Image: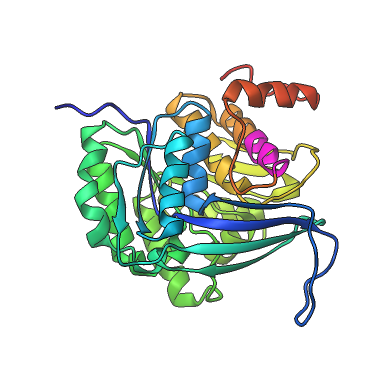
Amino acid sequence: MLEEERDVIAIGDTQVALTFASTSVPLTYDTEITVPNVMLTVAGSTTNFAIAASKIGLKTALISKTGGDYYGRLNLEGLKRLGVDVSQLKVSPEERTSISVVIVHDSGKKFVVTYLGTQGTLSFEDIEPHLAYVKQTRAKLVHVGGYFLLPLLHGEPAIKILKQSRDAGALTSFDTCWDPKAWTSERVRTVRGILKHVDVFLPNLKEAQYISGSRSYRKASEALLNLGPKIVAVKMGRKGCFAVSQNKKVRIKALKVKVINPDGAGDAFNAGIAYGIIKGLGLEDTAKLANALGALKTTRPGTYLDFETLGEMVNQLRKEGVALLEEV
């Protein structure tokens, strides 16, 4: 039987997060603080991307692994409720699900402690049986995220996933996330090799600087483009974003919104880029949409974009005096 078509298939990390947002008190050891809000939600860079993509109207599936514990059940049910296809999400009964504790300061800075759990054991062997789903569903784009939090997918396993996705007819996008082992030359060299198999690369500014070796966002973006991607879109937080292709460069200023929790803003941005590419928007409109979705995410306390629909997001932007999404 022919599977229902999918716009996007996300491959990478999934977990739950206990988020405390936010506090005006700086974190130090041997102290106790109180916060006005706490949330226990599904999370993970790739998962946040999948949720955002689903929220804005893309048919989205997630290929990942979760544990058979309480947090795994919470993860699975949460993803179903949020509209993500979890038919390709592996449940490993004997393993423990990844979980993060996120504490957000009023300045927007955050402190994160993560237990890797099933993220630390997710392997190419876990993923390979599900790659046929890319072709079966005629997926338009495969997004690989959370790379540095998935140690068994580093290097050749990631390349295999991207190559097989391309062979199945999909475009590929890639987000490394932050390297907790301090961007050694070997790890940077490995990422550069992976970019030969990537159509859309989605780093933040610091990641782009480390991988390219350039401090300038323009030079960094162009250097990364020369490594293989067709599009490089750099997330620059309060400075907006910069997107570049072989024939166009676009700088978009940040939107002024009240920031509650910046966690997951980059993942919402990534979903906006995916939407623009899939829907055939130009680079500038795509970057504007992504920039707006990232800004909207920061106005929410959780880790993912929790507006119900793209229309609700458009209305919220209009209330803020921003009209960027009429084209979508």
Q: How is the image coloured?
A: rainbow
Q: Residue at x 26, y 31 (%)?
A: 138
Q: Which residues are magenta?
A: 291-300
* Left or right, residue 42 beside residue 318: left
Residue 279: x and y in percent read 46, 24
Residue 317: x and y in percent read 73, 26
Is residue 287 in the magenta section? Answer: no
Give the dominant element type of the magenta stretch: helix, strand or loop: helix
Residue 162: x and y in percent read 31, 51
Toward which corner of the image does residue 87 lie, by quadrant?
top left
- Which residue occupies the foreground of this view, 196 or 287? 287
Toward which corner of the image does residue 24 lie, by quadrant?
bottom right
Q: Residue furthest bottom?
A: 30
* Left or right, residue 23 beside residue 112: right
Q: Residue at x 64, y 31 (%)?
A: 288
Is residue 174 visible in the rendered image? The answer is no
Q: Residue at x 44, y 60 (%)?
A: 147
Q: Residue at x 61, y 49 (%)?
A: 303
Q: In the rendered image of this protein, does residue 248 appear above or below residue 326?
A: below
